[in-house]
Image (cartoon, rainbow, N blue to C red):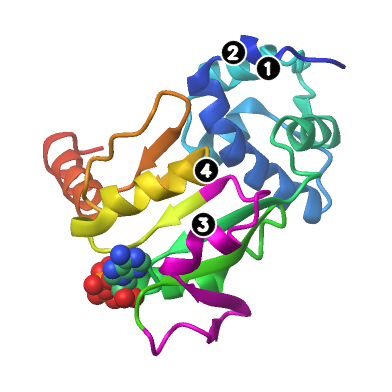
Amino acid sequence: MNIDQGKIPQATAKRLPLYYRFLENLQASGKHRVSSTELSEAVKVDSATIRRDFSYFGALGKKGYGYNVNYLLSFFRKTLDQDEITKVTLIGVGNLGTAFLHYNFSKNNSTKIDMAFDVQEDKVGTEVGNVPIHHLDDLEKILDPDVTVAILTVPSSVAQKVADRLVDCGIKGILNFTPARLSVPKNVRVHHIDLSVELQSLIYFLKHYPM
Ligand code: ATP
């Protein structure tokens, strides 16, 4: 089936990786169907939203049967480009950056951190989690043009400067783990993950909206 991806609302698109991961685990455990209630409990999205999300790509659950896991997975694979590996670079091999390089999204074989950059001489020329670390001075020279996404784990004081250079290199998406708010051109997407803000927000919700 051909789906016009422009028609999938952004909020739905954002939930796809969540669904995808859960369905992959279901398939691995030999399950072939799943109800929206079951999915809802697992991914913490209400079942009406799940039904609406799935209706965008023609997956209509059957009453008493639920959804076909294999069908959904093959659809998600295409939509999320799971068949293609997206190459990612990481800038700033500190504590957080090092953790990402070791993790390297090995459970999700659709993304791979290909190369990393830092400015500390003792890190340059080494490898962390099999990923080579280069000097940031060489960014423009050696960044693989196939790399379109960057993870930013540098100190926030240099985040904007580094982001500007990444944009000039043709990077289209930045996952920003620094507290800095980045300015980028309209054709570049930044997703900001500020861990301390997320933690504070969680604590706030626990306090004010107990379940
Ligand atoms: P974190 O836990 O946030 O990763 P850290 O305390 O280990 O941090 P930071 O001072 O936040 O270290 O720096 C993160 C990494 O970014 C370090 O390895 C540092 O050498 C590197 N770094 C600093 N400035 C730059 C820069 N301009 N470009 C690339 N890397 C940089």
- List the residue tagged with mark 3: 140
At a point 20% along the width and 47% down the height, the residue shown is 197
Cα–Cα gap, marks 4 and 1: 22 Å
Is 142 within the magenta?
A: yes
Q: Which is nearer the eye, 209 or 4? A: 4
Q: Dot 2, how many residues are within 10 Å of its Cα: few (below 14), some (14-19), or many (20+)? A: few
Is 179 within the magenta?
A: no
Q: Nearer the viewer, mark 3 or mark 1?
A: 3
Mark 4, ligand 1, within 8 Å: the answer is no
Q: Quadrant of the N terminus?
A: top right
Whether tag 4 and tag 3 are in contact, CB under 8 A, the answer is no
Cα–Cα gap, marks 3 and 2: 44 Å
Q: Residue flagged by tag 2: what amino acid is it? A: Arg
> Which label number is shown at residue 5?
1
> Which label number is shown at residue 52?
2
Mark 2, ligand 1, within 8 Å: the answer is no
Cα–Cα gap, marks 4 and 3: 11 Å
- List the residue tagged with mark 4: 171
Q: Which residues are magenta?
A: 121-149
Q: Is residue 45 left or right of residue 120?
A: right
Residue 70 falls in which quadrant of the image? top right
Cα–Cα gap, marks 2 and 1: 15 Å
On the image, the x and y values in percent for residue 63 come to 75, 15
Task: Tell me the element at label 3.
Answer: helix
